[in-house]
Amino acid sequence: MIQVVLFLITVALIAAGFVWLADRPGDVVVTWLGYHVETSVMVMLLAVAALIVIGVMFWSVARAIWRSPEQVSLFFRHRRAMKGYLAISRGLVAIGSGDTRLARRSADEAARLSPGDPLTLLLTAQSAQLAGDRVGAERAFHEMTRHEQTKLLGLRGLYIEAQRRNDMVTARRVAEQAAEADPALAWAGQAVLDDRCAQGDWSGALKSLDAMRASLDKQDHRRKRAVLLTAQAQALADSDRDAARLAALDAVKLAPGLVPAAAFAGRRLAEAGDQRRAGKVLIAAWRLNPHPDIAEAYADLRPGDTARARLTRMQTLAGKSSEEPNAVREGAIAVARAAIDAREFKIARETLAPYLNAPSKRVATLMAEIEETEHGDEGRVREWLGRAMRAAPDPVWTADGVVSDRWLPVSPRGRLDGYEWRVPLAEIGMTHPVVDAPPPPMPALQPEPKPVVEAPEPIEIKAVVPSEAPKADLAKPVPVAKPSRPALKPVAAEPVMPLIQVPDDPGPDAGLDPDPLTEKPLPGDGWPRGGKLFR
């Protein structure tokens, strides 16, 4: 709309100009070189305009003729570039689809049409990689490093190729060059950081981490720095205790819930005589992440204390746990451990009581230790050890499928902060509950059906008769040939998993029902009756 208005205004001004000239006629006389020209003003203006148009046309034609070689060359270059672009596009699509032959042909065509183009170099390198030509790929990546635009891309390719042939020296050198060229480059900084961690150069790793700070999230940077400081503190534990303590405290400030840092700092502060500060550090870490290492460090806060004093300290720490079930459970296990050391078995039993229906390995092991230390009951000890063998696993330090008895800053595959406190089987999706409870006692007058035993020859079994039944000679064997299932009505019982015997314990005979650890003795039989169950 605005353009139409401007056009109409322009036409109106031109018309007004012609009208103004028509209303004011005049004569123009030109005498030059013997020529005498006399005309009106209007005709003179039209003649000047025509001369200007003719001059512009002549100049355009002359300029086009003068620039024709350049234009022709530009046309052919443009057409060549378009063909190269199409070849590059066709080659990249072929690489994506896995067509090695088309990719190599397109790369050769692109190299002929657009030599030195960044995309051409990339296509050449990737087509060589697709064809398995490692030498050709490295040659293309080396060519990339000579151009400023593709230098980082070439270094990245050389780094990958060095890793593929397991040449860690070259990979480290290339990564250092890339990190020096661009400190914010994530892959180069991470590669240098991993190399420093693998060598145990924690000071160099901290410098590398600070160099790549711009490419990391703030929380991620704080966490990794805390892990590196903790690793540095552990490395300096024997040579420079003060520096180790300061490094651990810096790690705790960055990540208060980092268990290894808090446990190490708490122990070093306690050794230095600052038990109050050590307790604050350990309690703060316990509230964020309850862990056995923190409980152990808190128990050793005062090395000269008695076992009862340690028990009291553990009860105080457990009281500061959150209401989260895992925190309550860890607190209970810590209190039970301290109670066993203090020989307060009643407290240990009461603390572990809520977890005995489905105990974990640690809970079952603690119960076996209680039975052995308090009563020396080998039967109960074996029972709890058997339950510990099939109980739900406890969290451990695990990384890359490897379980470690202590925390390490680097995983077996070289990942920083790779170790996590978790159940190893959780990685394969084991989510079903583990049922571990002894079967309920059966009524004495309604025996459960015995399993059918198929045998080619007659076998001998000992009959178990209730006290109300007529007395029989238990020592006399009863011959049975191919016994069939008794026609007794089974007693309804809750479905539970059968108990598995400990490998070094043969267990009761297969034909007997009662569990000697849970079944009450039959009336009138007493201990001799129970002794026969184990024959």
Image (cartoon, grey):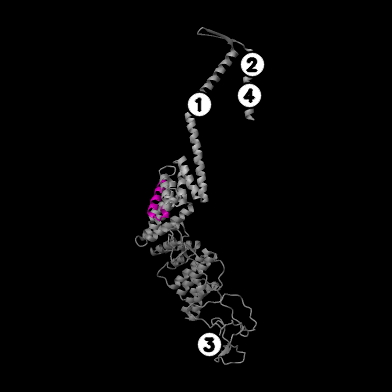
Give the mark nearer the N terminus: 3 vs 4: 4
Mark 3 or 1, closer to the camera:
1
Q: Is residue 288 visible?
A: yes
Give the mark nearer the N terminus: 1 vs 2: 2
The location of residue 400, given as percent across then percent down, is 46, 61
Q: Residues within 10 Å of mark 3 (few under 14, many from 20)?
A: few
Please tell me whether mark 4 sits on a helix, a strand or a loop.
Answer: helix
Q: Main secondary structure of the magenta part?
A: helix
Q: Which residue is mark 1?
A: 64
CB of mark 2 within 8 Å of CB of mark 4? Answer: no
Along the line of sight, which residue is nearer the eye, 46 or 430?
Answer: 46
Residue range (magenta): 162-182
- Identified by mark 2, the residue type is Val
The location of residue 295, given as percent across then percent down, is 46, 67
Please tell me whether mark 3 sits on a helix, a strand or a loop.
Answer: helix
Q: Which residue is mark 4?
A: 9
Q: Is residue 117 left or right of residue 26?
A: left
* The N terminus lies in quadrant: top right
Please tell me whether mark 2 sits on a helix, a strand or a loop.
Answer: helix
Give the mark nearer the N terminus: 1 vs 4: 4
Q: Is residue 426 left or right of residue 442?
A: left
Gap between marks 2 and 3 measured at Cα: 139 Å
The location of residue 486, given as percent across then percent down, is 63, 84
Residue 19: mark = 2
- Identified by mark 4, the residue type is Ile
Along the line of sight, which residue is nearer the eye, 165 or 474?
Answer: 165
- Identified by mark 3, the residue type is Lys
Gap between marks 2 and 4 measured at Cα: 15 Å
Q: Which residue is mark 3?
A: 532
> Is 11 situated above or below 442?
above
Q: Does the magenta run of residues contain 128?
A: no
